[in-house]
Image: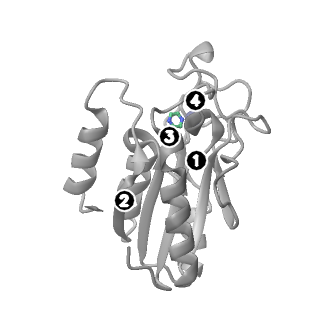
Amino acid sequence: MGYDEWAALIVTDMQNDFADPRGSLYVRGGEEIVSFVNGQIEGARARKAMVVYTQDWHPPSTPHFQKDGGVWPVHCVQESWGAAIHPALQAEGEIVKKGSGGEDGYSGFSVRDPVSGEKAATRLEPLLRDGGVRRVVLVGIATDYCVKETALDAKRLGFEVVVLGDGIRAVDLQPGDGERAIEEMIAAGARVE
Ligand code: VGL
Ligand code: ZN
């Protein structure tokens, strides 16, 4: 990937609950992408590209969880082992937390109140704008949720978007969800490499 000072690598939700086989919402193959992502982090740093991490950060009860009326098993609860960034990941840089107030936190750029549907921005966009970023490079978990929504929001906001196919993994609640997410991102104008 050609990193430069106008690019930012966004490392999406590389957390134990998604990337460790013992995690409560383990995404198959999540642990396999850690070394690829570390390589991208090193490449980005070497060329002065910004590296930003997102972190799903839920309260113990939220309508995002099945037990509270949502769809997901309990995962990434604030301060828990599952919410921690995967220990093998080189994690130095800004971390943008999402979902802290009980919202659905799919996109790194915005959160959505699961009851009212109201959207609110995270600090990701100002962080990128302040750094002069024009192009975002996406890796992480999950292709069919947070990576996809972050890519679509980034396009809407006018960033050039590149998604690295070797650095993402899908939940695939329905077989083919990951593939369909990739098609949606391409249709929205993202480049998938
Ligand atoms: C995610 C499901 C629930 C993700 C977060 O990071 O893709 N997926 N919460
Ligand atoms: Zn979540």
Q: Earlier in the sequence, mark 2 or mark 3?
A: 3
The residue depicted at 38 percent of the width and 56 percent of the height is 151
The residue depicted at 54 percent of the width and 51 percent of the height is 34
As measured in the structure, the alpha-carbon distance from the residue carrying label 1 to the one carrying label 2 is 15 Å
Which kind of residue does numbered mark 3 sit on?
Answer: Gly
Q: Contact, CB < 8 Å: mark 4 with mark 1? A: no
Q: Contact, CB < 8 Å: mark 2 with mark 4? A: no
Q: Which quarter of the image is occupied by the C terminus?
A: bottom left
Q: Contact, CB < 8 Å: mark 1 with mark 2? A: no
Q: Could you tell whether 169 is left or right of 96 in the image? A: left
Given residues 36 and 130, the one toward you in this image is: 36
The residue depicted at 27 percent of the width and 48 percent of the height is 182
Task: State the SS at label 3.
Answer: helix
How far across and how far down the image is residue 192, in percent? Answer: 28, 59
Q: Could you tell whether 188 is left or right of 3 in the image? A: left
Q: Earlier in the sequence, mark 4 or mark 3?
A: 4
Q: Which mark is residue 83?
A: none
Q: Which residue is mark 2?
A: 164
Name of the residue lying farthest toward the right: 79
Q: Is residue 118 visible?
A: no
Task: State the SS at label 4.
Answer: loop
Label 1: how many Cα within 10 Å (few below 14, some 14–19, many 20+): many
Q: Is residue 111 visible?
A: yes
Q: Which residue is mark 4?
A: 21
Q: Which residue is mark 3?
A: 30
As measured in the structure, the alpha-carbon distance from the residue carrying label 4 to the one carrying label 1 is 13 Å
The residue depicted at 37 percent of the width and 54 percent of the height is 166
